[in-house]
Image (spheres, grey):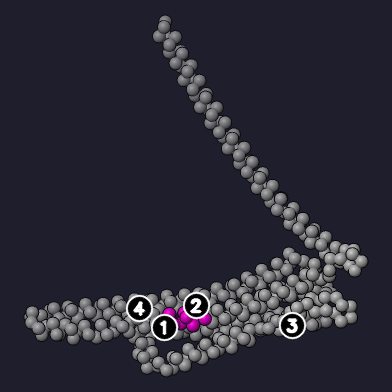
């Protein structure tokens, strides 16, 4: 809701709050604690499954821990950025502020160089938002990679275990076949020999269990971190929209029905920027058109030369034909 100035009765820009990631960190902590409680309640079966392939399963757990820590860091990184923006908005001396966090460093560099009251053009606002979105997208790409890596490691461990099981079954069958006499005792010996590999086959899928479960954990934490980033991005967008030049210029018309000078100045400045971008675009298209016409001229010249060469060859053939006829008539 817009706020009215108690002195003049004008509508002021709505107060934008930078809330930070507190709510989403709570959800992430509750989910992590629930997963840890379930893992502790299933400690025995999980330990047996882990010992089926300690190397790959240990690597999966290490990647999971790193991914969880990185996801928490991704969400917690919003807090310092939000606090810096709050201090920037209320600070009288912008130069006394500490260095901004990496998440909003390009935006802070742009808005810190404005003199007096912060006022940005529409194009500058879009550039600032794009820089913040690029930083957030880069951080989310690493988190998604951790989830895919966990699935890959799970499948790798499963296939590794299946290869060992198949090799053990082959050795058991070969050992029984060498001492086979064709009786019922050989069948019982074969069943006893492959019993352990068959039981171990179920344990071979433990890597997939750890990989998929870890990917599920990383996916939920990444979802909450992305929600926190999107909310912070929306708050930045609302704040920048409220301090853009057209918004800072005030209403389009004054009380007597005339256009506000500040609004007209901001509108003219934005129009100049639009015309400048249009001029650059037209210049680029003109260069492309010149290149296309030059290429077309070269192709036409080559085609004309080829046609002239073919016509010259045909004339020569015709002259030789006429000369041969004249010699034949004589």
Sequence order check, earlier mark of 4 and 2? 2
Place residue 248 in its image quadrant: bottom right
Q: Camera-side residue: 153 or 83?
A: 83
Within 10 Å of disc 2 (Cα), the crowding (few <14, some 14-19, many 20+) is many
Secondary element under disc 2, as helix, strand or loop, is helix
For the N terminus, the quadrant is bottom right
For the C terminus, the quadrant is top left
Is residue 211 highlighted in magenta? Answer: yes
Q: Going 46% across and 17% down the picture, which residue do you hit?
A: 320
C-alpha gap between disc 4 and disc 3: 51 Å
Majority secondary structure of the magenta segment?
Answer: helix
Q: Are marks 1 and 3 in contact (CB under 8 Å)?
A: no
C-alpha gap between disc 3 and disc 2: 33 Å
Within 10 Å of disc 1 (Cα), the crowding (few <14, some 14-19, many 20+) is many
Q: Going 79% across and 82% down the picture, which residue do you hit?
A: 90
Secondary element under disc 1, as helix, strand or loop, is helix
Sequence order check, earlier mark of 4 and 3? 3
What residue would you read off at disc 3? 86
Q: Camera-side residue: 36 or 4?
A: 4
C-alpha gap between disc 2 and disc 1: 13 Å
Res. 102 in view? no
What residue would you read off at disc 2? 146
Q: Residue furthest right?
A: 256
* Residue 104 on image: x %, y %: 68, 76
What residue would you read off at disc 1? 210
Mark in front: 4 vs 3: 3
Secondary element under disc 3, as helix, strand or loop, is helix
Sequence order check, earlier mark of 3 and 2? 3
Please provide the residue range marked out in magenta. Answer: 210-220
Q: Camera-side residue: 56 or 326?
A: 56
């Amino acid at each position: 809701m817009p706020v009215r100035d108690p002195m003049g009765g004008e509508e002021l820009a709505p107060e934008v709050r930078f809330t930070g990631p507190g709510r989403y960190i709570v959800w992430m902590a509750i989910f992590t604690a629930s997963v840890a409680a379930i893992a502790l309640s299933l400690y025995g079966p999980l330990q047996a499954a882990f010992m089926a392939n300690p190397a790959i399963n240990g690597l999966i757990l290490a990647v999971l821990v790193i991914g969880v820590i990185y996801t928490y860091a991704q969400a917690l990184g919003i807090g310092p950025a939000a606090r810096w923006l709050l201090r920037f908005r209320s600070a009288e001396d912008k130069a006394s502020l500490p260095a901004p966090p990496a998440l909003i460093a390009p935006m802070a560099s742009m808005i810190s160089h404005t003199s007096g009251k912060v006022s940005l053009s529409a194009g500058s606002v879009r550039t600032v938002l794009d820089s913040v979105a690029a930083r957030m997208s880069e951080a989310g790409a690493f988190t998604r990679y951790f989830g895919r890596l966990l699935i890959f490691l799970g499948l790798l461990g499963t296939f590794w275990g299946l290869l060992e099981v198949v090799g053990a079954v082959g050795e058991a069958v070969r050992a029984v076949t060498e001492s086979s006499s064709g009786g019922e005792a050989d069948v019982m010996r074969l069943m006893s020999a492959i019993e352990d590999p068959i039981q171990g086959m179920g344990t071979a899928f433990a890597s997939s269990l750890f990989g998929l479960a870890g990917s599920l954990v990383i996916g939920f934490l990444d979802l909450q971190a992305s929600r926190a980033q999107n909310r912070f991005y929306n708050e930045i967008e609302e704040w920048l929209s409220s301090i853009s030049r057209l918004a800072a210029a005030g209403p389009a018309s004054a009380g007597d029905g005339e256009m506000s000078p500040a609004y007209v100045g901001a509108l003219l400045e934005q129009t100049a920027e639009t015309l400048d971008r249009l001029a650059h675009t037209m210049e680029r298209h003109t260069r492309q058109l010149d290149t296309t016409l030059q290429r077309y001229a070269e192709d036409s010249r080559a085609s004309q030369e080829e046609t002239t060469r073919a016509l010259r060859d045909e004339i020569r053939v015709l002259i030789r034909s006429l000369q041969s006829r004249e010699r034949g008539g004589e």
